[in-house]
Image (cartoon, rainbow, N blue to C red):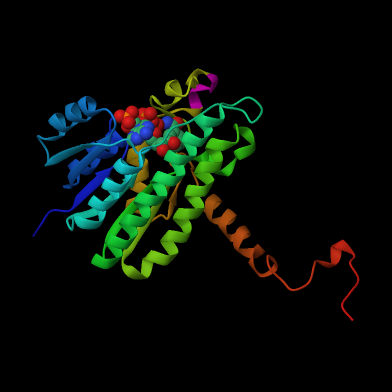
Amino acid sequence: MTRSKAIITGATGGIGAVYADRLADRGHDLILTGRDLSRLSELADRLGRKTHVETIAADLDRADDLGALASRLESDASLTLLVNNAGIASGGRALSADLDEQERLIRLNVIAATRLALAAARAFAARGRGTIINIASVTALMPERFPPVYPATKAYLLAFGQSLAAELAPAGVRVHNVLPGATRTEIWERAGLSLDAFPAEMVMEVEEMVDAALAGFDQGELVTIPSLPDADDWQRLETARAALGPNLSRNRAAARFGLPTAA
Ligand SMILES: NC(=O)c1ccc[n+]([C@@H]2O[C@H](COP(=O)([O-])OP(=O)(O)OC[C@H]3O[C@@H](n4cnc5c(N)ncnc54)[C@H](OP(=O)(O)O)[C@@H]3O)[C@@H](O)[C@H]2O)c1
């Protein structure tokens, strides 16, 4: 039997590198991608003692690199898991942000993540099995507390992942949506931000975040928020959202607007 293989984007450090370590322990062969090949190779050397590791240098902001990775997802039949993790952050506020930087953020966090997830979705559905793990963020749930573009990219990813999960379940493909809170990685410094702005009790170590996300995965969660003590809190939010359903699209405006009633 061929071993299952996982592809992890953004594996050079942070959350992606810990997923790589944990998935190696779980018996997956690995494809590690990111831009920095020397850091990928260092990780591959370390994990090579546990499993077979391949590295692919890819800048997901480049259409050719993104297309090549999507093609690999489609053509490599041993791939059964995509960790859709690569992402960048920005502290850019609406009135002052560099617009090119904000577009770069959208291209990586939204366009690249979508392209890879859809390539994986089609390939895994055709093979009748597979898993896509999308790394979103709790900022998706509290956008007004952050500059606008980053949480919007993560809200997109959450909605995308929830819809994808519903469509793919009958095809035997699972979609797991992970919403980390503040986690100690390089993303903050790279975006010119500091984790020191948060009280220490709000910042999780990256190993603990990934271990909790994998525990949530093992428990069958669709959405995992690693620090949330009571999973029912999330379910209550989902129930309230579902309760809006019957009234979200109707043939008449609501009575509260006082419009004339139809003849
Ligand atoms: N840390 C947090 O507090 C936190 C909270 C919620 C969600 N998240 C999400 O978690 C994910 C991982 O972030 P992290 O915290 O682990 O940050 P990180 O340590 O900065 O890792 C980000 C990864 O993305 C890769 N990457 C960046 N730009 C890329 C590009 N153009 N093409 C290909 N790869 C690129 C980086 O590798 P190279 O530089 O080698 O390309 C790196 O491996 C992101 O989607 C982030 O939004 C993080």
Query: In the image, 239: left or right of 185?
Result: right
- On the image, the x and y values in percent for residue 228 come to 49, 42
Give the position of the C terminus as an image quadrant. bottom right
Does the segment drawn in magenta span residue 4?
Answer: no
Residue drawn at (62%, 33%) of the image:
145
Query: In the image, 204: left or right of 173?
Result: right
Query: In the image, 53: left or right of 99?
Result: left
- On the image, the x and y values in percent for residue 167 come to 42, 66
Q: Is residue 223 above or below residue 24?
A: below
**Residue extent of the magenta highlight:** 197-201
Q: Is residue 71 above or below residue 153?
A: below
Query: In the image, 34: left or right of 229?
Result: left
Q: Is residue 135 above or below residue 38?
A: below
Quarter of the rendered image showing ligand 1: top left
Residue drawn at (68%, 68%) of the image:
249
Give the position of the N terminus as an image quadrant. bottom left
Mark yes or no: residue 33 visible: yes
Residue drawn at (50%, 28%) of the image:
202
Mark yes or no: residue 206 visible: no
- On the image, the x and y values in percent for residue 211 come to 32, 40
Report the magenta stretch's main SS. helix
